[in-house]
């Protein structure tokens, strides 16, 4: 009887299950592995097949690479903090900042320009240092770090989700960038209204100088090394005929290791501190969480739950506009990654819209789909940046969601408004 329930009901029940377990302070990786097992069993896979699937997905090459990347990010963050370089980054930025609210928003946003898994872990220590003396709650710091870390991805062409959307829609990159850029404005406004407004306002009493800017640039060299290595190696590999496939995460890993070397050398960090960073309990916990995320996502895909949800929406004759908004939202909620909601929902959306719209109107529907998909992703309990932020600040997941609901609704309303304006304007072209 339970197996016959609609897939949409099942996935909602699984999310509730994750939230309930999390509320009782059960380790999040246990919540994720348990939920993966529940999905497998609920979708008709036997116990042996479910265990096999969970193990295969959690220990796949992609899962292990991602776990290593996250561990290296944590190690770099730990080294920056212990060498007091993170504190210097915050202090030098404060010297060129307009005030504490500006600092709290800009530091995660700067890190957000770099597409990296779990990038919120980079900016979390910065937000913590910026909060010195303000007494913000763990949930508010988590929400601010998480929200402003993700203001660019709606249009920033370096993100895989945008690249895939451009390719699937078969439009010029500048067209999609121009159409979806206003989504970023909605995120900025909502973040200021509902998150930053809760922070005590402190204006800067100093005028930035060239020396202050130079100090800030010098302190953020580790991040520059990561970015330069990522794109520099990409450029080099494009012109070298390698006899083997270059691992997609290796550029990032190389950049992280170089950045760690810079931090260790410039701060004269002892070997014991480096060892503690590598084998810290938090580091191990985060590695297990990554494996849990990949197991959960893999089981969802292999059991075809997302496909069933999509088929159900079409079978029940739900209006096209609602499907265009709901499918990416659900996919984002389930998968917690932009590449996931674009890859799983856009092909179906394009098929649904075929013959119904003409020319530039596709940009209106893409804006609707991406805005809803991204908000689904932002509310996903398996979104890596939400998990690492929550764990770093020791925040309550339910309390963090409570703070994110209002800005999320604001962005969804803003997305609908943009869709209506675009549809009217583009229909006239």
Image (cartoon, rainbow, N blue to C red):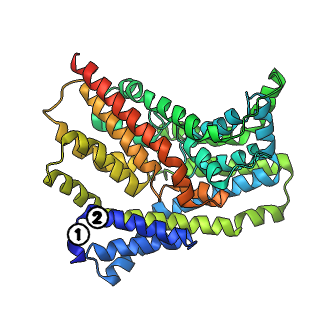
- Which numbered marker is on residue 382? none
Q: Viewed as shown, does residue 114 lie left or right of 359? A: right
Q: Is residue 60 visible?
A: no
Can the viewer see residue 399? yes
Name the residue: 28% across, 64% down: 9
Q: Secondary structure at mark 1?
A: loop
Q: Going by the image, does 354 lie left or right of 81? A: left
Work out whether 103 lies above or below 252: above
The tag on residue 9 is 2
| Label 2 Cα neighbours within 10 Å, binned few <14 / some 14-19 / many ≥20 | few
Residue positioned 37% across, 39% down in the render: 370
Q: CA distance from mark 2 to mark 1?
A: 7 Å
- Specify the quadrant that holds the N terminus: bottom left
Circle 2/circle 1 CB separation < 8 Å: yes
Foreground pick, 380 / 301: 380
Q: Residue 50 in the image: x percent, y percent?
A: 35, 77
Q: On the image, numbered disc 1 is attached to which residue?
A: 5
Residue 287, image x, y percentages: 58, 65
The relative height of residue 410 versus residue 60 in the rendered view (above or below) is above
Q: Residue furthest top?
A: 429
Residue at 34 percent across and 83 percent down: it is 48
Q: Image point 51% across, 48% down: which residue? A: 404
């Amino acid at each position: 009887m339970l197996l016959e329930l609609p897939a949409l009901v099942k996935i909602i029940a699984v999310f509730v299950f994750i939230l309930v377990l999390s509320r009782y302070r059960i380790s999040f990786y246990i919540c994720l592995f348990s939920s993966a097992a529940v999905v497998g069993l609920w979708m008709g896979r036997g116990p042996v097949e479910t265990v096999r699937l969970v193990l295969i997905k959690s220990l796949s090459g992609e899962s292990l690479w991602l776990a290593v990347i996250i561990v290296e990010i944590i190690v770099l963050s730990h080294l920056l903090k212990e060498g007091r370089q993170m504190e210097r980054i915050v202090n030098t930025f404060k010297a060129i900042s307009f005030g504490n609210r500006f600092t709290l928003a800009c530091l995660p946003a700067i890190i957000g320009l770099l597409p990296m898994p779990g990038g919120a872990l980079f900016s979390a220590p910065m937000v913590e240092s910026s909060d010195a003396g303000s007494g913000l709650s763990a949930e508010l710091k988590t929400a601010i770090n998480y929200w402003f870390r993700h203001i660019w991805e709606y249009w920033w062409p370096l993100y895989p989700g945008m690249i895939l959307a451009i390719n699937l829609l078969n439009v010029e990159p500048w067209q999609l960038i121009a159409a979806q850029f206003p989504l970023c404005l909605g995120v900025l406004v909502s973040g200021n209204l509902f998150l930053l407004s809760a922070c005590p306002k402190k204006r800067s009493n100093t005028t930035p100088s060239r020396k202050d800017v130079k100090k800030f640039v010098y302190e953020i060299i580790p991040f520059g090394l990561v970015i330069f290595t990522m794109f520099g190696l990409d450029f080099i590999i494009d012109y070298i005929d390698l006899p083997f496939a270059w691992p997609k995460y290796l550029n990032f890993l190389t950049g992280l290791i170089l950045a760690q070397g810079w931090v260790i050398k410039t701060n004269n960090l002892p070997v014991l501190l480096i060892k503690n960073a590598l084998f810290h309990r938090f580091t191990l916990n985060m590695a297990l969480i990554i494996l849990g995320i990949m197991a959960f996502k893999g089981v969802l895909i292999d059991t075809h739950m997302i496909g069933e949800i999509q088929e159900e929406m079409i079978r029940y004759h739900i209006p096209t506009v609602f499907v265009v908004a709901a499918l990416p939202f659900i996919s984002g909620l389930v998968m917690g990654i932009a590449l996931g909601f674009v890859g799983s929902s856009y092909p179906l959306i394009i098929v649904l819209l075929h013959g119904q719209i003409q020319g530039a109107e596709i940009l209106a529907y893409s804006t609707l789909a991406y805005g809803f998909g991204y908000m689904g992703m932002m509310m996903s309990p398996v979104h890596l940046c939400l998990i690492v932020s929550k764990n770093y600040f020791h925040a309550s997941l339910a309390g963090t969601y409570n703070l994110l609901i209002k800005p999320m609704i604001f962005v969804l309303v803003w997305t609908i408004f943009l869709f209506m304006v675009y549809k009217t304007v583009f229909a006239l072209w």
